[in-house]
Image (cartoon, rainbow, N blue to C red):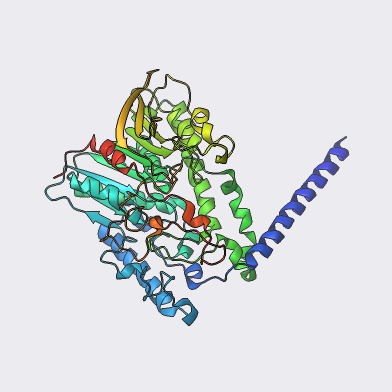
Amino acid sequence: MVAFTRRWLVRGAGLLLGVIALVLVLRIYDVQRGPPLGPWHTVVPAEMTRAAMETADWRAWLAAEQAVMETVRREVTEALDTPERVPVNRYFAGSPMHAPGFAQDWNRSFILEPDGPPNGVAVFLHGLTDAPFSMRHLAEAYRARGFLAIGIRMPGHGSVPAGLTDAVWEDWMAATRLAVRTARARLPEGPLHLVGYSNGGALALKHALDAVEDPRLPQADRIVLLSPMVGVTAFARFAGIAGLPALLPRFAKTAWLDIQPEFNPFKYNSFPVNAARQTHRLTAALQAQLDRLAVAGRLAGLPQVLTFQSVVDATVSTPAVLTALYARLPAGGEHEVVLFDLNRDIRFGPLFAPGADAALERIVAPAPRHYALTVIGTDGAGTVAARVMPAGATQAQVQPLGLSWPRDVFSLSHVALPFPPEDGLYGAQPAPGDDFGVRLGALALRGERGALVIGLDSFARVTSNPFFPYIIDRLSEALPQPR
C-alpha cells in the first residue's frame, strides 16, 4: 500500500511538473513574439534603501528621489536610440507627454501648503504602477480646507517600469512611515488623515494596523480608502512562476506580464511579474494581520474607516473589502463603505456578463450591519441618489444627489474614483488649462484593430468619476470649510 501511494505521488508530481513546463514553454513563445524591451524596461534606478527610509527626513527623501530622476534622464532619456525618439514615448525629451517638461512633474513627491497655519495634515498614498499625480485632486481639496497635504512617491514608481522589477511591498511601507513621520514632524498636534488609493489603500490600512500593535507609530484620526487593494485575484499568488524563465537572459521578457508603449506621463503601461507578486504578498500580510487583531479583539483601536468602491472592479476584489475588512471591524467605530452601483437607467440587459447586474445583492451582507453602507445608484428616473443605511439599521434613507450618469457609461472602474471629469489627463471633460500632452479620458475611439500603438480595450475603461463631487462632499464632513 505504501509503495502504491508513493508511486502515485511520484506520478502526480511528474504530471504537475510537466504541466508547469508546458505553461512556461507557451509563455516563452507568446512573450518572445511581442515587442522588444526598451531601456525603460531594463534600467533600474537605485532607490533609497529601506533601512535609510526608517530614519530619513523629507529633505533626504527628496534628494534620493532627485537621484532616481537623474538616472532616468541620463540612462534612458539621453540614451534613446533614434527609433525610440518619437512623440508617443514619454521618455523622449521632445514628447508632449515628457513629464519633466511640465510646470509641475506629478511623478514626484509633493507637499501642498494651506494659505494659513494648518489645522490638520493628510498623507496621500497612490496606487500600483501609478504616481502621486492620482492623488492631486484629493490633496488639493484638503489643502483648500486648511490641511497640509503630503503625497509621497512609492519606490519603483514615477520613474521607469523597470523600477517595479526590483521593489517589494516592505519598501512601500517604509516610505509610508516616512511620510507619516514627516506629517507629524510638520504638525505634532491636530488631525492626521491617511488617504490611500488602490495599493495605497492597502498601505494606509496596514500602517493603521501597525500603529495598533506598535504605539510608537503615529496613529491616524481617519482613514479614507478609494478602490483599496484588500484582496486581489488568485493569479497574483502564482505570478512568480510566470517570470521563472527570466532567470535566463535570453528570456528576460518573461519578467513582464505586459509590455506596452509608454505614453502615459504618470502611469506605467507595462506591467512586470514582480508587481503582481508584491500585491499578493501585501494583501496576504494585511489579511493575516486583520485576522490576528480581530481574534485578539484589538480592531477597536482603528480610527474611522471610510471607503469608496465600485461594485464592479476588475483590479481589486470588491467582496474582499466587505468580507476581509468591514466584516471584521467592531461596531461603534463609525465605519462606512460607499459602493458605486451600475448604471441601471440604461437597459444594457443581456450585454452584462452573467451575474454582473446582480453583483450588489451578491456581495452585500443582509442588514442590519455594524457598519454604515451607502449605495450610489440610479433612482429609476435618470438621476442619481444615495441609499444610506446607518449601522444597525434595516431601512435605507434615500437622498437625491442632483447628479446623473453619463449616457455612455455603464459603471465606474477601479481607476476612475480619484479623478474628476475636469482632470486634464483622465477626465471626460478636461479643463482647457490642465494639459499633459494627451487627453486619455476624453478619447472616444472607434476604428479598426491594429491601427493604434495600443489595443482599443485600453481606451474603453472609464477613467474619471462623474460622482467625484460627492466624494469631496463626504470628505469635507470632517474638514473645515474652504479658505
Q: Is residue 5 left or right of residue 253?
A: right
Depth order, front residue of 420/214: 420
Residue 132, position as x, y percentages in the image: 34, 55
Residue 403, position as x, y percentages in the image: 32, 38
- Residue at (81, 46) in percent of width and height: 10
Write down the quadrant of residue 257 in the picture.
Answer: bottom right
- Residue at (35, 58) in percent of width and height: 425
Q: Is residue 374 above or below residue 450?
A: above
Q: Is residue 60 left or right of residue 289?
A: left
Depth order, front residue of 374/402: 402
Residue 357, position as x, y percentages in the image: 52, 34
Q: Is residue 144 left or right of residue 21?
A: left
Depth order, front residue of 322/413: 413
Q: Is residue 405 above or below residue 249?
A: above
Q: Is residue 218 visible?
A: no
Q: Is residue 393 visible?
A: yes
Q: Is residue 398 above or below residue 269?
A: above
Locate the N terminus by quadrant. top right
